[in-house]
Image: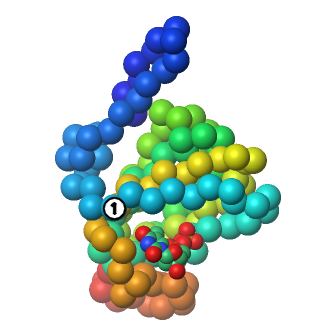
């Protein structure tokens, strides 16, 4: 992400359709995550996301049905784009970490795939 270094404190920013590759329709954030807890554990059919560790650190594990990749979000100026149709898990949250999530669509439970076997079936049949 852009980083404006300043002895008064650093600043980063994000604009939709600029640093963020979609129009932002939703913002939410995860905080007060107890040690050892995991979040995520699902894929979206349509929603795209962009994740930033505003404070502290956590890992995002992305899975396209073939391979998994772990991203360590431990800088406030790192941003992770998650395309639709990708299984995502979030874990290893540090104390007081805050995960900002920007989404391309409003919340809809119908957009979630929460069953991993269903995800693999949809992925291998090209439906997502
Ligand atoms: P969920 O996306 O399952 O959490 P995570 O993937 O981080 O573990 O959401 C948890 C609950 O919060 C679920 O009942 C739906 C609700 N929720 C909203 O109402 N709006 C939102 O934008 C999000 C992300 C979740």
Q: Residue 62 vs residue 15: left or right?
A: right
Considering depth in this image, is 44 or 13 the residue closer to the camera?
Answer: 13
Q: Residue, x 52% and y 67% (percent of image)?
A: 88
Relative to residue 127, is residue 42 drawn left or right?
right
Question: Looking at the image, which residue is at 44% across and 43% down?
Answer: 79
Q: How is the image coloured?
A: rainbow
Q: Position of residue 99 (x, y in %)?
A: 55, 51
Where residue 9 appears, as percent x and y from the top left, is 52, 17
Residue 92 vertical position relative to residue 120 in the rendered view, above or below: above
Query: What residue is drawn where x is 53% and y is 35%?
Result: 76
In this figure, which residue is indicated by the disc labeled 1? Answer: 26
Image quadrant containing the N terminus: top left
Residue 35 lies, in percent from the top left, at 79, 58
Q: Quadrant of the C terminus?
A: bottom left
> Helix, strand, or loop for circle 1?
strand
Q: From the viewer's perspective, is 20 left or right of 116?
A: left
Q: Is mark 1 within 8 Å of ligand 1?
A: yes
**Residue 74 vertical placement versus 7 (above, below):** below
How crowded pointer 1 is (Cα within 10 Å; few <14, some 14-19, many 20+) is rated as few
Quick one: which residue is furthest to the top in this view? 7
- The percent position of residue 56, horizontal first and vertical second, equals 65, 41
- Farthest residue to the right: give it: 35
């Amino acid at each position: 992400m852009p980083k404006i270094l300043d002895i008064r404190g650093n600043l980063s920013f994000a604009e939709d359709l600029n640093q963020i590759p979609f129009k932002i329709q939703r913002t939410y954030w995860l905080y007060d995550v107890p040690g050892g807890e995991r979040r995520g554990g699902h894929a979206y059919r349509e929603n795209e996301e962009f994740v930033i560790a505003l404070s502290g650190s956590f890992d995002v594990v992305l899975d396209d049905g073939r391979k998994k990749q772990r991203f360590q979000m431990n800088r406030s100026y790192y941003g992770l784009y998650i395309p639709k149709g990708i299984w995502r898990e979030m874990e290893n949250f540090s104390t007081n970490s805050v995960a900002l999530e920007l989404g391309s669509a409003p919340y809809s439970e119908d957009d979630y795939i929460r069953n991993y076997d269903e995800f693999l079936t949809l992925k291998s049949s090209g439906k997502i």
